[in-house]
Image (cartoon, grey):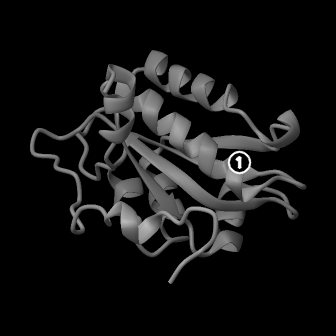
């Protein structure tokens, strides 16, 4: 396989970061990759709230159940699904940010904010917008290892050709 393919399938979520801020150049590049992500009908119905202050990250972490990476991160980017936006596009933009981060030596972890209303209130996001997903970023800790939950399912268990088969 080629280098780009190997890079993509090698992406792993990392939850342990060094205690240092992200270079602004790296954060700007990650946000540029987000901005250039494709979207349904090119509507780009998203915006981003960048949270770097530790107190603000801790407050945001209260809006989810598995948010240790937000607390540990140097920066967390909340994906705001604007009115008439699509959840699929939010996933695309998160993946692009994570791939861009990896190319810069920045670790990342996708996060679900289980209490969207709490996240919106914490961030000052108006009604009618969804703040369900975020990505935590930081330089990987020396001992950071990807979470392992048992590998990947076999293709035969995932891929259906022509029709869904049980």
The 10 Å Cα crowd at callout 1, few under 14, some 14 to 19, many 20 or more, is many
Query: Which SS class for mark 1?
Result: helix
Image x and y of residue 144, in percent: 16, 46
- Can you say whether 50 is above or below 25 in the image? below
Image x and y of residue 99, in percent: 44, 33
> Residue 74 appears in which quarter of the rendering?
top left
Is residue 20 in view from this perspective?
yes
Image-based side of 20 in relation to 93, left or right? left
Image-based side of 86 in relation to 111, left or right? right
Question: Residue at point 18% right, 41% down?
Answer: 141
> Residue 130 appears in which quarter of the rendering?
bottom right
Question: Residue at point 25% right, 43% down?
Answer: 17
Image-based side of 20 in relation to 23, left or right? left
Image x and y of residue 119, in percent: 64, 64
Image-based side of 149 in relation to 52, left or right? left
Which of the pair 74/147 is nearer the observer?
A: 147
Instruction: Check the image and name the residue furthest to the top.
Output: 25
Q: Quadrant of the N terminus?
A: top left
Question: Residue at point 81% right, 37% down?
Answer: 44
Question: Residue at point 31% right, 46% down?
Answer: 12
> For the image shown, how many numbered marks are present on the structure?
1
The residue that label 1 is drawn on is 89
- Can you say whether 159 is above or below 146 in the image? below
Is residue 21 in view from this perspective?
no
Instruction: Check the image and name the residue furthest to the bottom.
Output: 166
């Amino acid at each position: 396989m080629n280098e780009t393919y190997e890079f993509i399938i090698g992406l792993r979520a990392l939850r342990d970061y060094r205690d240092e801020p992200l270079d602004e150049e790296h954060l700007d590049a990650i946000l540029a990759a987000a901005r250039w992500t494709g979207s349904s009908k090119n509507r780009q119905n998203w915006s981003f709230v960048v949270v770097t202050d530790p107190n603000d990250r801790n407050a945001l972490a209260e809006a989810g159940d598995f948010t240790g990476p937000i607390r540990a991160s140097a920066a967390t980017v909340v994906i705001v699904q604007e009115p008439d936006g699509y959840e699929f596009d939010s996933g695309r933009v998160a993946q692009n940010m994570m791939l861009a981060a990896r190319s810069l030596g920045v670790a990342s972890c996708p996060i679900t904010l289980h209490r969207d209303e709490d996240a919106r209130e914490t961030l000052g996001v108006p009604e009618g917008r969804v703040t369900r997903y975020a990505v935590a970023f930081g330089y990987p800790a020396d001992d950071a290892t990807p979470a392992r939950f048992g590998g990947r399912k076999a293709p035969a268990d995932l891929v259906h050709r022509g029709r869904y088969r049980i």
